[in-house]
Image: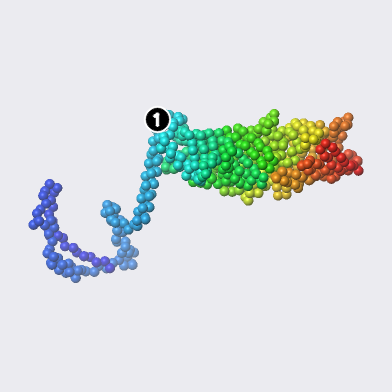
Amino acid sequence: MAVAKAVPPPETVVFFGPDEEAPDKETQVVTSAPEGEEAEAERRMRDEAVPVPGPQPSDGISAGDLVKPAEEDADPVVAASAPQPASNASAKSKSRILRRMLRSATITAVVLAMLAGAVVFLGLGTRFDAPDWLRDRVERRIERHLGGLSIEFGAIHLVVNRGWRPRVSLRDVTLRDETGARVARLADAQASLAMRPLLRGQIRPKTIMLSGLYGTLRRDNSGGLALSLAEGEAPLRQAATLPALIEQWDSQLELPVLSALIAVETEALTLRYEDARLGRVWTLDGGSIRMSRSGQDIELAAGFSLLSGRDYVGTVEANYSSAIGDKAAEFGVLVNSVASKDIAAQSAALGWLDVLDAPISGSLRGAISSVGALLPVSASLQIGEGVIQPTAATRPVPITGAQSYFTYLPDRQELRFNELSVNSGWGSGTMEGRARLIGVENGQLTDLVGQLRFQDLSLNPAKLYDTPLDLAGVTADFKLEMAPFRLRLGQMLVRDGDTRILLDGRFLPGRQAGTTR
């Protein structure tokens, strides 16, 4: 129930202007009734108050509709000055937020001022040296995201390109671990900065460019890999397999500081590959690696020249694509004029190529499952002019060319040859079939067992015949032993018209033996 209450006005109100003097104490600005009379009058009005009925349900309104919320009628000035029931923790939180906003605004203003000043006084594309205070700040900011590594660099430059995108350049960069050991060294590192984070006071690279990097990839006797980015220094990354090594770099892209990164380019890269299992070393020179990122998908593309000490230089190109945080990936390798023995040493599935001494060009494509297992690999190889010579003691058989299309099934350790054609001084022919890798030691093929079917086979070994011997079809079961080299024919069926010839035997370096029936 609402109650109406009358309040008596003051008896006397005296107003005076800013130039008038205030009345003396005898003159009251507001004259009210004496204290006793005032109390009596208030009691009398309370007794005489008439109750006023409130709104009824049939009126369609409620009592709350007749009164505005206090915050709507409150004076904004008074409300702002009124004490708030906030805790000390809330006040500190608001203070921190305010400081961050001020700091971001300050950094943004400084950055924009520097960019504008650089453009006005130096022009777009002009490089200028950063002051020492900025150098120290960049060094601390980078080390914050290096996982315990420290960074050293020579000069630092800032360039503003068209589009107002700044680029920071560091010269003579060195990374060291907690013990002070050098783990990476490169001649030049550059990063263009993402503009949107920069305007919020955040430094986020959009692209990173590296140049003059020397790396060493070592494979130990167990097959594990270790990568160091400084000659003769401690490894920076280690993993059991190459995909696992790539995955370690992949995970770095999930760091907040790299959230705006879309590309990393590496040029003038030299990679030394050492294989302790074979005691061999390869040098990949003039290399480049590019990483492209689109959302959660990444693609790697690499290219190198392979120096093998021969009178020709081979090239290797590779690509790799996957999603961040996912082991599943697809890959491809393209080789051009790479020595057959160098290719044979990289995988047991390619070990049978070691019997050749010839340049090979071609491609391989495969995939990796979500659990990191190798999936089927398809290969297309074109073999150039060379010789078939398993060992130095074996008489070389010249070949003018060969080509092969095959698939490797890792889960079954099987090679499926869709086509294997050879043109040599002993004959020519096309074959198909399959073979199983039944012996692998230290990642290298030791034994291969299979069956091949030859078509359009033309033979003239050591020019024994005036005209080559043409055979309509030949089927052969074989076992190839690589070390020491032996070729055993369990059964070889030769069809020539209505004639059937069944052969078996073996071939050894420097001599040959066999039987026929």
Name the residue nearer the viewer: 153 or 195. Answer: 153
Q: Residue furthest bottom?
A: 47
Above or below — where is 423 with respect to 410? above
- Estimate the x, y position of residue 204 in percent, counting from the top left: 47, 41
Q: Residue at x 32, y 64 (%)?
A: 62
Q: Residue at x 69, y 30 (%)?
A: 310
- Estimate the x, y position of residue 240 in percent, counting from the top left: 63, 47
- The secondary structure type at the circle numbered 1 is helix
Whether residue 492 is visible, yes or no, is: no
Q: Residue at x 43, y 34 (%)?
A: 130
Quadrant hosting residue 48: bottom left
> How many numbered marks have been drawn onto this rendered protein structure?
1
Describe residue 306's horizontal placement relative to residue 473 as left or right.
left
- Estimate the x, y position of residue 111 in percent, counting from the top left: 41, 38
Q: Residue at x 78, y 41 (%)?
A: 484
Q: Which residue carries the number 1 mark?
A: 120
Name the amino acid, label 1. Val
Whether residue 176 is visible, yes or no, is: yes
Look at the image and tell me in which quarter the C terminus lies: top right
